[in-house]
Image (cartoon, rainbow, N blue to C red):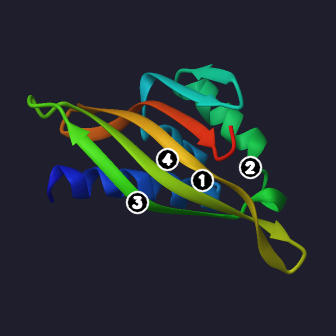
Amino acid sequence: MTVHEELATLIALYCHFCDDGRFDAFAELFTEDAQFVVMGQVHHGRDAIKAFMQAAQPPQRRGKHITSNAVFVVDPGGERAEGKTDYVFLARSGDSFAIQSVGRYHDQFVRQNGRWRFARREIVFFGE
């Protein structure tokens, strides 16, 4: 796979693991000292990120993350990258789904032991 394909796969796994409630696998997508920024709060470290997401996405609130328009810039050394990806989150609404939030992920990635991980992810909601 190319670096761009690897980063796109990382973003897809983030969505799948979160939507499926696979929070151990979700946490492994981040570096040990990663930062996750959402709604003005910064969650530091893999364990804190996992705990936040588990609380934010209990089974009855899980929906579907849809991503598109990903743009990546890879550092010349090939061990760091930055990216921006648009997303839509569809939340459960009765027997169907409704758009709950729309925004953009602002990401910093690092390659560790041959695997890309999130070093920092910030969610910027449209309209902020």
Image x and y of residue 13, in percent: 44, 56
Q: Helix, strand, or loop for circle 2?
A: loop
Numbered disc in front, either 3 or 1: 3
Q: Helix, strand, or loop for circle 3?
A: strand
Q: Which residue is drawn at 55% across and 57% down?
A: 87
Image x and y of residue 91, in percent: 76, 63
Q: Residue at x 37, y 55 (%)?
A: 70
Question: Mark 1 near mark 2, Cβ–Cβ under 8 Å?
Answer: yes
Give left or right: position of 54 versus 14.
right
Q: Helix, strand, or loop for circle 4?
A: helix
Mark positioned earlier in the residue sequence (4 or 1): 1
- Distance of label 4 from label 3 (alpha carbons): 25 Å
Which residue, given by chain and number where applicable, does mark 2 sit on?
A: 57
Give left or right: position of 53 versus 44.
right
Which residue, given by chain and number where applicable, does mark 4 sit on?
A: 25
Give left or right: position of 45 versus 4.
right
Which residue, given by chain and number where applicable, does mark 3 sit on?
A: 69
Mark positioned earlier in the residue sequence (3 or 1): 1
User: Tag 3: Cα neighbours inside 10 Å, few (<14), some, or many (≥20)?
Assistant: few
